[in-house]
């Protein structure tokens, strides 16, 4: 059973029960019932409202706008919104290539309430990205890919890295559409159900990149070979391997990129439930 609800701050920064699509609260079903990690006192009232909303939605069995089944537990993802303020004073483009590099002059509120001095920082405008780990719960196999990465030129072992399917979100695309498109382009893989594992910032100290990370149900029989778009210079080798072997690759340090590590750690945590769900008549 999958259900979806939304929360967002209003114009004054207060949390309300309105439903913009940008801020998801992901809900699954747990035999033990609901539980929340209540991180801030001001959210208590809205969490109580959400609890009522979730139970109403679960009991009514109405189809949801979106959803995720997060293993055998219920997860409430409420993004943290700091009350701290900041001010952008100047923005300048330093370089425009595949990505844009910009110089910023800004200042921000400090934790003691005072303002910081004017700071100059460089930021890489990467834009939103999407990653998906294709997984066949019946065969208990995952799809990993291997490709050349310029960022790893000076890394011991060389710049060919074991990763998962990923790509940039283009204008007009949803993250789910990107996940399905990239899976076909990079691995010849058709994705069925998608589960949002994480939404995260990989390098917030100097980049605006924000990643939606999914588990994608697929059928791995017949997958493999070399894939990628010639016009983008892609040369991607597909690895189909048992989930337990992928976990060993991770533990042995064979996988260096953060995205596949996050995805595989998530899969290992929920592995038993996903297998049980797939093999139970």
Image: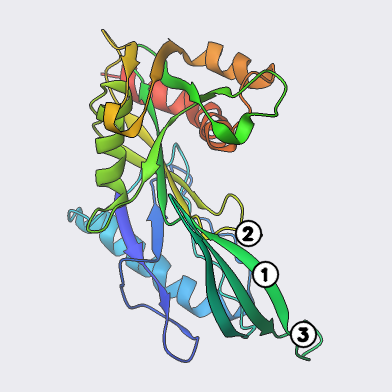
Answer with left or right where residue 71 lies relative to residue 260: left
- In this orientation, does residue 226 appear? yes
**Which residue is found at the position 58% from the left and 81% from the top?**
42
**Which residue is found at the position 82% from the left and 86% from the top?**
112
Residue designated by label 2: 206
Residue designated by label 1: 121
Residue designated by label 3: 116
Label 1 element class: strand
Q: Quadrant of residue 161?
A: top right
Could you say which is closer to the camera, residue 137 or residue 56?
137
**Label 2 neighbour load within 10 Å: few <14, some 14-19, many 20+:** few
Q: Are marks 1 and 2 in contact (CB under 8 Å)?
A: yes
**Which residue is found at the position 60% from the left and 70% from the top?**
103
Disc 3 versus disc 1: nearer the observer: 1
Q: CA distance from mark 3 to mark 1?
A: 13 Å
Label 2 element class: loop
**Label 3 neighbour load within 10 Å: few <14, some 14-19, many 20+:** few
Q: Quadrant of residue 56?
A: bottom left
Report the quarter where the C terminus lies: top left
Q: Position of residue 97 (x, y in %)?
A: 45, 53
Answer with left or right where residue 119 lies relative to residue 247: right
258 to 237, vertically: above or below? below
Report the quarter where the N terminus lies: top left
């Amino acid at each position: 059973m999958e259900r979806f609800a939304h929360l967002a701050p209003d114009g004054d920064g207060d949390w309300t029960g309105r439903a913009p699509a940008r801020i998801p609260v992901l809900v699954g079903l747990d035999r033990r019932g609901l539980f929340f990690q209540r991180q801030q006192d001001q959210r208590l009232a809205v969490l109580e409202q959400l609890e009522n909303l979730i139970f109403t939605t679960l009991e009514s069995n109405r189809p949801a706008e979106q959803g995720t089944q997060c293993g055998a537990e219920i997860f409430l993802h409420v993004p943290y919104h700091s009350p701290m303020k900041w001010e952008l004073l100047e923005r300048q483009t330093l370089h425009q290539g595949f990505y844009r590099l910009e110089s910023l002059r800004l200042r921000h509120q400090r934790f003691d309430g005072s303002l910081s001095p004017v700071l100059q920082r460089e930021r890489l405008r990467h834009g939103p990205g999407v990653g998906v780990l294709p997984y066949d719960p019946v065969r208990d196999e995952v799809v990993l890919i291997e490709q050349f990465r310029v960022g790893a030129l000076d890394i011991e072992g060389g710049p060919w890295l074991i990763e998962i399917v990923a790509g940039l979100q283009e204008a007009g695309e949803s993250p789910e559409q990107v996940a399905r498109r990239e899976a076909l382009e990079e691995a010849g893989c058709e994705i069925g159900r998608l589960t949002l594992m994480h939404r995260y910032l990989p390098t917030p100290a100097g980049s605006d990149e924000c990643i939606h990370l999914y588990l994608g149900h697929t059928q791995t029989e017949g997958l493999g070979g070399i894939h990628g778009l010639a016009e983008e210079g892609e040369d991607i080798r597909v690895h189909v391997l048992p989930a337990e072997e992928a976990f060993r690759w991770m533990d042995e340090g064979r996988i260096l990129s953060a995205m596949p590590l996050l995805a595989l750690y998530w899969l290992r945590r929920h592995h038993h439930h996903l297998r049980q769900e797939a093999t139970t008549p």
